[in-house]
Image (spheres, rainbow, N blue to C red):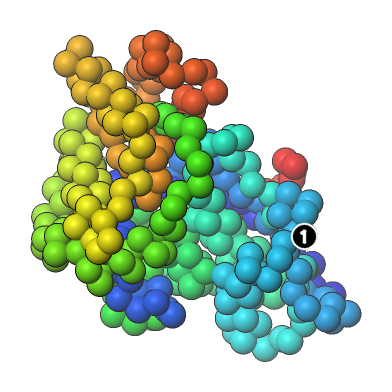
């Protein structure tokens, strides 16, 4: 039996979006993306390789998962087994520390934590670059959760060249506030949404054509610690991404009436002089990019239209690391 340590990875939110795959199997994206890792949301995972196990097992929050949930996990485990020269099946124990009903996809933190935990349990000493490539094979956005602060996932051209790199530790006045809107399960999954948009939306090429300029501009704004420009670029990038879905066949959107209400609240805050902008992923929830020092003021304003449970504050978070005390 090879028993590993508990490893923690935090979720990241993309400011320059990843939307569309060039290679489905290897999860090679159509474009580079850039994200901010956050302190508020994380996953803790331990892996045990055991010769007595007949099949791989995944326990999420103490509940054994079905074969569908195991699919991405097995991809990562198989790569680790091949690298380590072992054949033992694995028991994966994972706990998601995500606020109830946050509507925040945990695949980024979950697969990044798995990559770290599985490689440790197998006795591998992988670099951050190798861990990023490994995490990517489970979930593309997980490649960025290896790092704290800002990270850029470089699309590359193959399995060896597609990985994330650190950009900035975000040790300055930047934070995020989540507006969680109560919506039913989305009709179109992220995976299906990407496929449909890439294949059928006439707006998709226009989205790709503007990405290099967005990336260059936001990295310059991060370097200058210019919160207004970082937010403005991220907001435009998110709106362009969501515009591509309206051109898909059949068209679709992830927005809900409350999403639009949240966007309007952000515009109202800007009129009052706050440097605040929004971003959205493939779902209805709205994430605000603002000064960390103004999170409390912005939250107080939003309480006029949203409940306390719908508003979650977040600050820049750390990269992948072993935890000495498990916080179940």
Q: Quadrant of residue 228?
A: top left
Q: Is residue 156 above or below residue 146?
A: below
Looking at the image, can residue 314 be seen? no
Q: Is residue 36 above or below residue 33?
A: above
> Looking at the image, which residue sits at the far right?
52
Residue at numbered disc 1: 64
Question: Looking at this view, is 31 or 162 the one in front?
Answer: 31
Say which residue appears at 63% left-offset and 41% top-offset. 97
> Looking at the image, which residue sits at the far front?
250
Say which residue appears at 63% left-offset and 75% top-offset. 74
Question: Looking at this view, is 83 or 236 the one in front?
Answer: 236
Q: Is residue 215 above or below residue 163?
A: above
How far across and how far down the image is residue 224, in percent? 19, 38
How far across and how far down the image is residue 270, in percent? 20, 20
Q: Please indicate whether residue 120 sits to the left or right of residue 50 in the image.
A: left
Looking at the image, can residue 91 be seen? yes
Alpha-carbon neighbours of circle 1 within 10 Å: few (<14), some, or many (≥20)?
few
Q: Across the whole image, how many numbered discs are drawn on residues?
A: 1
How far across and how far down the image is residue 100, in percent? 61, 35
Image quarter in which the N terminus is found: bottom right
Image quarter in which the C terminus is found: top right
How far across and how far down the image is residue 256, in percent? 36, 37
Q: Quadrant of residue 287?
A: top left
Is disc 1 placed on a helix, strand or loop?
A: strand
Question: Looking at this view, is 206 or 174 the one in front?
Answer: 206
Say which residue appears at 14% left-offset and 48% top-offset. 217
Say which residue appears at 30% left-offset and 76% top-offset. 22
């Amino acid at each position: 039996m090879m028993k590993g340590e508990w490893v923690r990875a935090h979720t990241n939110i993309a400011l320059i979006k990843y939307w569309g795959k060039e290679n489905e199997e290897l999860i090679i994206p159509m474009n580079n993306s850039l994200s901010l890792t956050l302190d508020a949301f994380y996953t803790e995972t331990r892996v045990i390789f055991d010769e007595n196990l007949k099949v791989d097992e995944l326990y999420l929050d103490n509940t054994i998962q079905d074969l569908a949930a195991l699919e991405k996990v097995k991809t990562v485990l198989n790569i680790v087994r091949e690298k380590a020269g072992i054949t033992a099946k694995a028991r994966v124990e994972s706990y998601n520390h995500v606020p109830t009903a946050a509507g925040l996809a945990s695949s980024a933190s979950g697969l990044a934590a798995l990559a770290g935990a599985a490689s440790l349990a197998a006795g591998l000493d992988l670099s951050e670059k190798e861990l990023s490539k490994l995490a990517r094979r489970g979930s593309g956005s997980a490649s960025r959760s290896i790092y704290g602060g800002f990270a850029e996932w470089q699309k590359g051209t193959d399995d060896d060249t597609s990985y994330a790199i650190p950009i900035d530790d975000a040790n300055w006045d930047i934070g995020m506030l989540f507006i969680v809107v109560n919506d039913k399960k989305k009709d179109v999954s992220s995976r299906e949404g990407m496929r449909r948009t890439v294949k059928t939306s006439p707006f998709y090429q226009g989205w790709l054509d503007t990405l290099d300029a967005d990336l260059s501009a936001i990295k310059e704004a991060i370097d200058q610690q210019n919160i207004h420009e970082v937010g403005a670029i991220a907001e435009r990038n998110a709106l362009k991404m969501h515009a591509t879905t309206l051109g898909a066949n059949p068209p679709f959107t992830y927005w809900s009436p409350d999403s639009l209400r949240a966007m309007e609240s952000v515009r109202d805050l800007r009129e009052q002089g706050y440097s605040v902008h929004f971003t959205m992923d493939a779902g209805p929830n709205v994430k605000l990019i603002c000064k960390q020092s103004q999170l409390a003021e912005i939250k107080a304003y939003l309480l006029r239209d949203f409940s306390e449970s719908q508003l979650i504050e977040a600050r820049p978070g750390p990269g992948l690391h072993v935890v000495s005390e498990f916080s179940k």
